[in-house]
């Protein structure tokens, strides 16, 4: 029946484009979303099954995996793409929103991985691909909560790679760059109201102004989808798959220069210029 991939968060953005790419390459695709809407993919395809899946609900995760296995016999690749993006000032971010971000971006990833691992062990292999962000490499201002939720997934995925290697299961990270045109950022818009108080206004204005003249090309949904495809088909031991020119720029700055030079360059690109 061919290879099967399960992708979370496919109603728009990276998840939708990734599902479309794998369909075009002949894969069976389990496209999951909290509120299933098959029409987002246009024409129907026998190799596409749209399923409900809420990564914060264990019963929903288990049901989607069971339905996917019943439909196509196996799940070869899991892509944890569902996530919430958000900019905020830490002192103004309520605990309820912090927990909501972590429930989706972090604990949701843990839950889907725990649910799929027994199936992949039994079948003798598979790929788990967790989508994080370039901000796990070079952390930008006003995303402390979001970056923390994604950095946790990076450490989790790397450690998990050692646990699962002996079972033929590969764990990978896809690290998208900044993409202001995707719906991903819009998912966090309603949570951001009032989270940048007036005392931080000058800092935020300076930062957002610099983001309008970003130092590289923006990351595209297609670049992320291609990175996921590479991660899903690569037989080597690579863990991290950057997507977008800025991810590569940040990685070069982070790992090929001194800490002092790296911080200086980041402040030049993204800092407020208000410090003494």
Image (tube, grey):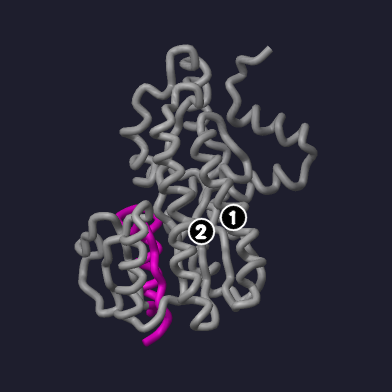
Outermost residue toward the bottom in this view: 1
Residue drawn at (34%, 81%) of the image? 72
Q: Is residue 226 visible?
A: no
- Asked whether disc 1 touches disc 2, contact meaning CB atoms under 8 Å apart, the reply is yes
Q: Which residues are magenta?
A: 1-27
Instruction: Write down the quadrant of residue 136 in the picture.
Output: top right
Residue drawn at (43%, 17%) of the image? 197
Asked if residue 119 lies in the magenta stretch, the reply is no
State the separation of the CA atoms marked 1 and 2: 10 Å
Asked if residue 16 lies in the magenta stretch, the reply is yes
Instruction: Write down the quadrant of residue 270 in the picture.
Output: top right
User: Can you identify the residue that label 2 sits on?
Assistant: 130
Residue drawn at (39%, 77%) of the image? 27
The secondary structure type at the circle numbered 1 is helix
Residue 1: image tag: none
Residue 51 in the figure: left or right of residue 122: left
User: Can you identify the residue that label 1 sits on?
Assistant: 156
In x, y percent, where is residue 60?
31, 61
């Amino acid at each position: 029946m061919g290879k099967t991939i399960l992708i979370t968060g496919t109603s728009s953005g990276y998840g939708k484009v990734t599902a479309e790419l794998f369909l075009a390459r002949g894969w069976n695709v389990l496209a999951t979303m909290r509120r299933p809407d098959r029409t987002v993919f246009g024409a129907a395809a026998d190799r596409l099954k749209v399923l409900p899946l809420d990564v914060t609900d264990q019963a929903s995760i288990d049901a989607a995996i069971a339905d996917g296995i019943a439909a196509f016999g196996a799940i070869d690749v899991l892509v944890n793409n569902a996530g919430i993006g958000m900019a905020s000032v830490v002192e103004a971010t309520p605990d309820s929103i912090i927990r909501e971000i972590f429930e989706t971006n972090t604990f949701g990833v843990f839950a889907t991985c725990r649910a799929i691992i027994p199936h992949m062990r039994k079948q003798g292999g598979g790929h788990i691909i967790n989508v994080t962000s370039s901000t796990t490499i070079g952390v930008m201002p006003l995303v402390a909560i979001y970056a923390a939720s994604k950095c946790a997934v990076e450490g989790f995925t790397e450690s998990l790679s050692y646990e699962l290697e002996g079972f033929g299961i590969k764990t990978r990270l896809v690290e998208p760059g900044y993409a202001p045109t995707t719906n991903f950022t819009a998912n966090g818009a309603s949570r951001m109201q009032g989270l940048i108080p007036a005392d931080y206004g000058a800092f935020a204005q300076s930062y957002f102004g610099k983001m309008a003249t970003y130092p590289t090309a923006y990351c595209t949904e297609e670049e992320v989808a291609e990175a996921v495809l590479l991660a899903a088909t690569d037989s080597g031991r690579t863990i991290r798959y950057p997507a977008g020119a800025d991810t590569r720029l940040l990685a070069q700055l982070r790992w090929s220069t001194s800490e002092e030079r790296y911080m200086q360059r980041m402040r030049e690109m993204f800092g407020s210029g208000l410090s003494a």
